[in-house]
Amino acid sequence: MKLAAFTTVGSDEIGIVKDGRILSITRALHEAPRAMIELIGRFEEFRARIQDLETSSDGWIGLGEVKLRAPVNRPGKILAIGLNYADHISETGREAPKEQVWFMKASSSAAGPYDPIQIPMASPESVDYEVELVAVIGKGGRHISRDEAPKAVFGYCVGNDVSVRAWQRHSPQWSVAKSFDTHSPFGPWITLTDEVADPHGLAIRCTVNGEERQMSNTKNLVFDLWTQIEYLSKAMTLEPGDLIFSGTPGGVGWVRKPPGLLKAGDVVRCEIERLGYIEGRCEDERSGK
C-alpha cells in the first residue's frame, strides 16, 4: 500500500495511491485522522477499513489532478546519517567512521516531492544534492534491538538531503547547513512495509538536468537501516512520523571536477526502485526564478 498527502480543490487530504490514481481516505473515512502523522500513530485502528478502500472501484482520480505534498507535513524529528556509503566516504577523502555520524535537519526544511528547491541568498554557490532512502517511523519506541527494528518502520520514501556546503564548513555540526527551507524534499508517497519488507537491495539514483550524478544500491549502506534504528533508539524515543535519512552514495556535486553544484533552473530528480521519484526545480530565493 502507498499513502500520500495531497491537496485538491483547496483541501488537504490523505489518500491511497494505486496504478497512477489516488483515492481520498479523508473523504471516505470521516473519522480517520486528517494529518498523516496522526494516522501513522493510529494506523492499526484503521488498517482494515483502509485496506477495504484500496479494493474499491469508486472515488479514484488521476494523480495529475492533485498536488502531492510532503507525506508528513512537520515531522517531529528528521534524523540524517553522514558518510554511510563507501564510495561517498572515498570521494570526500575521509576515513570510514567507526561510529555512526548523525545530524538533525529542522522539521521546517521538509518539502513536497515536486516543490521548488531554493537556492538561498545566504550561499547561492554551494548548494548540493544527495539522494537518500528515507524511513518513516511507525511504531517506534526506545531501546529497539536490531532484530526488532523492521517492526518500528511504517514505510519508505525517496529523499533529497539538500546541503549548503559553505555552511557545512562554518561548524563541525552540520545541522544548520542541512536545514535551509525546502532542503528536505521527500515522497512522493509513503510505500508501506507490506510492499517493501527489506529495503536493503533497491537501486538508487540522482540526475541533474537529465545527467546521471549518483547511482548505487541500498545494499551498499555501511550501517544498514536496522543498525541505524538500534543506535538512535538507545538515545531517544523514535515516534510515529519521524524520518530517518539513511545516507547518500558517491557522486555529489562538490567533489566533481569541475564542481557540479546546483544553480537556479537546474532540475534535480531522485529515484529509488519500487518507491518512485521526486523532482524539484531549483529557484533563486530572492526572485523565485
Image: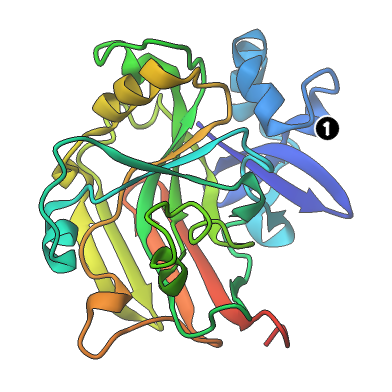
In-image side of 86 versus 6 (left or right):
left
Above or below, 154 against 146 in this view is below
Give the amino acid at mark 1.
Arg
In-image side of 263 versus 4 (left or right):
left
Indicate the quadrant where residue 23 lies: top right
The residue under label 1 is: 27
Look at 40% across and 63% down and name the residue there.
Answer: 270
Look at 63% across and 65% down and name the residue there.
Answer: 115
Indicate the quadrant where residue 253 lies: bottom left
The C terminus appears in which quarter of the rendering? Answer: bottom right
Closest to the observer, 80 or 150: 80
Q: Which percent across, then down, holds residue 152? A: 42, 18
Q: Which percent across, then down, holds residue 87? A: 13, 59
Look at 40% across and 26% down and name the residue there.
Answer: 193
Q: Can I make out residue 8 in this image?
A: yes
Indicate the quadrant where residue 5 lies: top right
Q: Which percent across, then down, holds residue 17? A: 58, 42
Mark 1 closeness class: few <14, some 14–19, many ≥20 residues within 10 Å: some
